[in-house]
Image: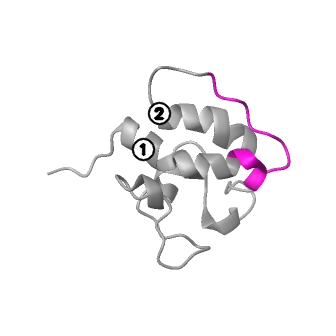
Amino acid sequence: MTNRITATRLGLALGPLLLAMAAGACSDSSPTTPTPTSTAPTLSMIQTQIFDPGCATCHTDVGRTPAGGLNLRPGAAFAGLVNVASSAQAGVIRVDPGNVNNS
């Protein structure tokens, strides 16, 4: 049995995280407002519309240690978010697949 996460579940699980980031948790500038779509967000959409413009300054390993140990660069974001313990809150998983309310 594989441990794969569908784009829909990942999008739903990232919802609370995205709201916090959109509120300015990662940078002083506002992230790009996502274009409404009829489909659930994908990691690629989240990467280009939220992480890249709003979090690249603090959450990258280019020339620095990422804030909170969370690298949100393309290719690293998934591994740093899904099933990873929070560095800020003990006992909390950053993105717990299938657990939208506690991710």
Query: Which residue matches tag 1?
Result: 10
C-beta proximity under 8 Å, tags 2 and 1: yes
Separation of residues labelled 2 and 1 (CA atoms): 7 Å
Pinpoint residue 71: horizontal percent, then vertical percent. 61, 56
How many numbered discs?
Answer: 2
Q: Magenta includes 32?
A: yes
SS state under label 1:
helix
Q: Is residue 57 visible?
A: no
What residue is shown at x 80% (from left), y 40% (from top)? 30
Q: Residue furthest bottom?
A: 90
What residue is shown at x 47% (from left), y 33% (from top)? 42
- Side (left or right) of 58 relative to 80: right
Pinpoint residue 101: horizontal percent, then vertical percent. 45, 56
Q: Is 64 or 70 nearer to us in this picture?
A: 70
Identify residue type, mark 2. Thr
Dot 2, crowdedness within 10 Å: few (<14), some or many (≥20)? some
Query: Which residue matches tag 2?
Result: 42
Vertical comparison of 102 with 5: above or below: below
Q: Is 37 or 74 nearer to us in this picture?
A: 37
What residue is shown at x 38% (from left), y 56% (from top)? 99
Say the numbered circle drawn on residue 98: none
Q: Is residue 42 visible?
A: yes
Residue 36: image quadrant is top right
Identify residue type, mark 1. Leu
Q: Magenta includes 75?
A: no
Q: Is 97 or 47 nearer to us in this picture?
A: 97
Dot 1, crowdedness within 10 Å: few (<14), some or many (≥20)? many
- The region drawn magenta spans 22-35
